[in-house]
Amino acid sequence: MEIRQGIPVSPGIVISEALILDFEELRIPQRFVAKDAIDDEVARFEQAVEDSNRSLKEEIERLSSEIEIHALILGVHRDLASDPMLHSEVEKGIRENCYTAEHALSRVMNRYVRKLQDLKSPILLERVHDLRDVEKLLLSTLLGKRIEGLSDLQGEVVVIAHNLTPAQTAKLDPEKVKGFATDMGGKTSHTAIMGRALGIPAVVGLDDISTAVVGGDRIIIDGYRGVVIIDPDEDQISDYLARGLEMEKLSLHFRSQAKLPAETIDGHLLEVHANIEIPSEVKAAVEFGASGIGLYRTEFIHLQSPTAGEEVHLENYRSVLESLGGLPLTVRTLDLGGDKLPEGGLEEENPFLGCRSIRWCLANPEPFRAQIRAILRAGALGPVRMMLPMITTIPELDRSLQIIDELSDEMRQSGVDFDENVPIGVMVEVPSLALIASHVADRVSFLSIGSNDLVQYTLAVDRGNEHVADLYDPMHPAILQLIAGLVRTGEEHGIRVSLCGEMASEPIYLPLLVGLGLREISVSPQLIPEVKQVIRHLLDYDVRILAERCLGMSDGDSITRELRLWAVENLPEVALRLI
Amino acid sequence: MSEISQTVKITYESGLHARASTEFVRLAQRFEAEIKVSRSDGIGVDGKSIIAVMTLGAQLGDEIVIETVGSDAAEALEALIQLVRLDFHGV
């Protein structure tokens, strides 16, 4: 038995057998063939291409519209696998150098990858992954090994991997896959997105789970607390079975009341919005009682297709607005950084302090401008707000606002249909901005606290780093002071202040956040029913006193203890999650 | 059969990359004609190979030469030139 702690990214509890995805480069046993076997070798390669294309074709047809993004990617894989130049060069390698098909293929692919990397275009770097995916597919076909029998699994499994890619998750049979656990990844990783989209528990950032687990091991994944137990004992299994059932019952109960307003006992109405990554999440958000989308992370659009222009963005926004049926949508402009850009896009010693987010956008104005135009045009289709991430200085904000103004003028002159009154807000993610919030509030229509980054930048802690992760504490008094200050600034300037981040979905933190005066929060769709339920059990008068008390405390642990105690006493319905 | 060719300037902001090259190659493959693409300074590559077209690295503002030869060379050339001019339908 072994217990691992990671980052919970999709809630739920599952106990099942592990299936390990093999991410190592496929080993090529033989590099050369005899001269008289050359024709056979070429035929073998042709057969592999044909087989691979057939399986890609089948997968493309099998994919529902829900995962159409994957179908697009697989379509490109087909183009690559049947590329005539690839064929002629592999054949040349076999015929002229007596290479095995596998070896010839790897050499040719490496050459293409280097060529793409030499072009130094971030757009093309994404294609490197596609080439590698196709190489793996062809190699495993050649080697007679099914790449992963994921689409025809016999029983239920949890998938353990180093890091899941869209090409891999596209193969998963959602009926059989009951959870994800990966070495890498964060809240916005592909694993997290898919876990939430499929509604199965997922834990990421587990360091070396993919090598610690052997296929067939029994695994418990606790997507509420980020715990993974390898080879659990009987007691743990029965505990978790009971806990899983309870949680399920509880969440069904929460869901049945999800459409009720998030109103405190003494009549203070809160808005609970949803954070989403892909348009298909909106349906769940609305079902779970979201009063809008408080954070639409648009990086996915860019990462799926780095050339995505104005029209692609607009299509995505249109689709989200349609599913929202009149509820408001807050679009965050591209929040890309060294950690999110495709491999080699930007090489920085410290991407979190580097050219990321709004800095990247101001340095790469074209994608930024295309997106702004799309957002302004989307404004003509429904209630849209625009949110600028990671602003740290006023000149940066002014520059961004100026670009937005220029584009509005342009569009007005050319008669494009758009909304010139789209409210513009900023995400407060860096303490420098929180401390000059009144200057910010003079310039924008709303502030949104990005608590994950605000905690990381205020406390100088990378929560993905296991050596310091325990210092990552959203209840550090400095964070509470910053939030309290921002709420005050909002009240003074008459603008809305919201909070989007994991902090808002922690039931024990919620009473404090409401007590600090926050009236709008945004969380993952699945968490909305519980968040609303908690809010309905609060008395604003009570939680204000609680917040005052917490603001007077000097360390995060005492504050957390205080909040836990308060929740157990005052929120019996959700106390289960706290045990 | 003689070859025909035409030069066209890339006005698409992302250049002849990823998505644009997919569009280009998929269209090229619909014709019988042999199709070559080159940058004004280089040798031609197979216009039906997505890898070749991608690695050409043609950017916004670059001029490319499209050469076609075969039974439907004229139609192929016209269609491909149109595609580049229309910015690959804004993919």
Image (tube, coloured by chain):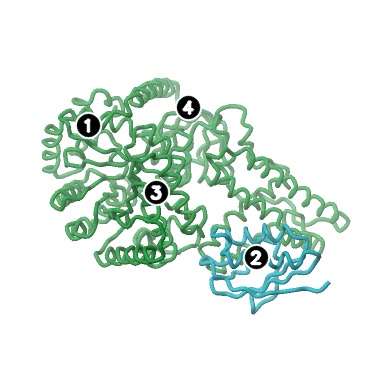
Chain colours: A green, B cyan
Report the Cα–Cα distance between label 4 and label 3. 45 Å
Badge 4 or badge 1: first in the primary sequence:
4
Badge 4 or badge 3: first in the primary sequence:
4
Q: Are marks 4 and 2 on the same chain?
A: no
Q: Chain of mark 2?
A: B
Instruction: Tell me where residue A70 appears, x and y as whole percent.
Output: 56, 45
Q: Which mark is residue B7?
A: none
In the picture of the structure, the residue carrying the numbered disc 4 is: A15
Report the Cα–Cα distance between label 4 and label 1. 36 Å
Report the Cα–Cα distance between label 1 and label 3. 29 Å
In the picture of the structure, the residue carrying the numbered disc 2 is: B53
Badge 1 or badge 3: first in the primary sequence:
1
Residue that extends furthest to the front in the rendered view of this protein: A415
Q: Is residue A104 visible?
A: no
Q: Which mark is residue A381?
A: 3
Q: How many marks?
A: 4
Report the Cα–Cα distance between label 4 and label 2. 48 Å
Quick one: label 3, few (<14), some, or many (20+) residues within 10 Å? some
Q: Are marks 4 and 1 on the same chain?
A: yes
* In-front residue for pair A166/A90: A166
Q: Chain of mark 4?
A: A
* In-front residue for pair A137/B31: B31
Q: Is residue B46 above or below residue A250?
A: below
Lateral position of residue A236 relative to residue A112, left or right: left
Amino acid type of the residue tagged 2 in the rendering: Val
Amino acid type of the residue tagged 1 in the rendering: Glu
Camera-near label (3 vs 2) is 3
